[in-house]
Each structure stands twice: as C-alpha cells, then as structure tokens.
Image (cartoon, rainbow, N blue to C red):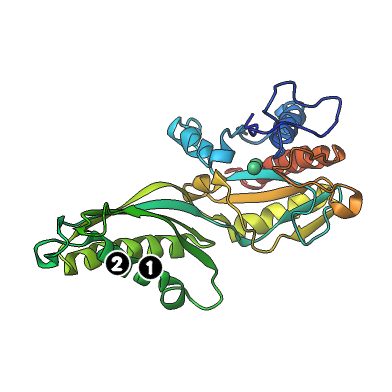
Amino acid sequence: MDALPQQEVSGVPFASENDGVCHACGHDGHIAMLLGAAKILKSHEEELEGTVKFMFQPAEELLQGSQSMIDAGILENPKVDVAMGMHMNFGPCGNYDMSVGTIATRVGQMMQSADEFEIVIKGKASHGSQPENGVNALSVAANIITSIQQIKTLDVPAGESCVVLLAKISGGKAANIIPDEVIIGGSMRTYSGELREKLKEHISDIVTSTARIWGAEAEVNYIFGTGPVENDPELAEEMLGYVAEVAEKIVDTGLIKGSEDFANIGKHVPTFFANVCAGGVAQGYAHMMHDPALRFDEEGLKYGAAVEATCAANWLSNHTENK
Ligand SMILES: [Zn+2]
Ligand SMILES: [Zn+2]
C-alpha cells in the first residue's frame, strides 16, 4: 500500500517485483505492524473492553487517504472515541537515537500542516498607453506578494514556526498590454491548527482587499491541505504510560519538518501519533524514507505491533464506562 514511483535498489531478496514502484517510505512495514497488532488483539478478544478498529490508511504520500476514510465513515459505526497512528522512522531522519525498540513522539505539536493555494487576480486589459482604462493585474499581484511575505514577520507569534511560500506566478502577454490576469501559486505550513486557520484567513483578506483597492477582483483557492499533527496532551500522556510498558526507550522527536494526513482524524477525536524507530545511521542504516536504497531493521516492527496492541487494550480498559 502507498508505494512510491521509484525503482527499488535495496538489494533485499523481497524487493519490489514491480518495476518503477517500491515501498520506500515504510508503508509495507506499517501494514505488517498493524496486522501484527490485530493478531495480538484478536487472540485476546475476550479480554478487550470495547471495540478496536484497524485503520489501514492509504495515500499518505498524497496526504489524502485519511480524509477519504473519514468520508467513508471510519469514525462512525461504532463511533470512535480516540485514535492513534504510527509511521516508521529509520536512517538519517532525526537527531535522536533511532535504535530498534525506540518510540519517537511528542506531547502537543509534532508535525506541520500542509496547504497549497492558488491566487487568481482578474484585472482589465487595456492598451499599454492607457493604463487608466485598464486594471493591471500584475501590479495588484506585486502588492499582494509583498503583503503575504510580511505575514511571517507581522502575524506569527515569537517562537512559533511556519512557512509561507510563494513559488509560482504566471500572467501577462506583452510588454505593451495591460495584463488582465495573474495566477500565483503558494504553500503554507504551520505546527498549530489555530495559526493555520488564522493565516488562511489573513491570506484571503490580503488578496481580496488589495484587489479591491486597485479595482481588481481576486480569490484564493485552497487546492488541498492537511492540518498539523498535534498530539492531544491528555491522551498522549496516558498513551506514553502504555508505550513505556513495551518500548525500550521513548524519545522526543522535536518539531518535525513534514506532514502526515492522519492529522485529519485529530480534527474529530483526540489523537496520538508516534514513530517506530527501526535503525538509524549509528546502527548501519544509511538511507532514509523516500530513498530507493532504504533498508530498515525488521526487529522494529514487533515493537510497533506491541505498542499499537497495548495502547488499544489499555486505553479501553481504563475508559470502560462501568468503572
Ligand atoms: Zn513518505
Ligand atoms: Zn510515509
């Protein structure tokens, strides 16, 4: 599930048999871990004090799979109270001990949101000798770009991190025609859902009010997006207690530059997300995720399965209504 368009060069006997497609992000490992957890929990079904759903999230690479599962009803029938998610970590991808048995996570903010947007500015074409009869969409775009680039300085609280990137622009036909349309493409990343909403709103305000001042029309289309991974503090503290029962070590990931659309689940129920370490550079694993030469220590998988199973069983027994 969720293989990448790369030719695997890992050299392992169980390398991908499909040319140009391989599991270079560990998603085959995720499936194996969750099936392992299902097997463990199934063998203790009588003792479980509730229902456990196993979420095989597709299309994480496109940051779209969790939303399609939400739309398909993953959180209903029976209704989900809390959720946890895991991703594998290996190679040179964190400044912490990545040895097998280590679970890397955080309480609170953990991973970035990811949003892409397109700004469409519509002006009015005119002969280049008569700017007063047209609306120059390119000049309006220049004003919008300047304002958006000030967001990081003026909008973002000290100590909060974010990226607001304008990376694409097109418009204009000739040096003597007032351009009537400009399209700008950009992206935005934050660690806080609150900041994400605030910046989205401010970008829209900047675009529409700047356009209005100069007689143009403009709109922002959010093309796709996922929220930041924020581990619910209460749930994370509880889960960390269960993780400690089976993991060799728990480390703090720090803020991770990257996104995970499991975050969409966190908009509906409290969530806990963690990384399962399966060998870093110090353990001889030199390739990280999205490297077609990657290998990881498969011993790490059993810790992932154990953490998933123990968190599910313990959470249920701690939250049974009759208690
Ligand atoms: Zn990936
Ligand atoms: Zn991945």
Q: Quadrant of residue 208?
A: bottom left
Q: Residues within 10 Å of mark 1 (few under 14, many from 20)?
A: many
The residue most toward the right is 283
The residue most toward the top is 17
Given the image, on which type of amino acid does mark 1 rest? Ile
Disc 1 secondary structure class: helix
Q: Quadrant of the N terminus?
A: top right
Which labelled disc corresponds to residue 221?
none
Using the image, determine if residue 75 lies above or below residue 121: above
- Image x and y of residue 181, in percent: 24, 53
Name the residue located 14 percent from the left edge and 66 percent from the top edge. 131
Q: Is mark 2 within 8 Å of ligand 1?
A: no
Given the image, on which type of amino acid does mark 2 rest? Ile
Residue that carries the numbered disc 2 in the rendered image = 206
Dot placed on the residue nearer the N-terminal end, 1 or 2:
1
Is 207 on the left or on the right of 43, as rendered? left
Number of residue marks: 2
Is 108 on the left or on the right of 15, as rendered? left
Q: Residues within 10 Å of mark 2 (few under 14, many from 20)?
A: some
Disc 2 secondary structure class: helix
- Image x and y of residue 165, in percent: 47, 61
Which labelled disc corresponds to residue 148?
1
Answer whether labels 1 and 2 touch (C-beta < 8 Å): yes
Q: Is residue 205 visible?
A: no
- Image x and y of residue 290, in percent: 69, 42
In depth, the one of 135 and 296 nearer the eye is 135
Name the residue located 90 percent from the left edge and 48 percent from the top edge. 284
Is 12 on the left or on the right of 263, as rendered? right
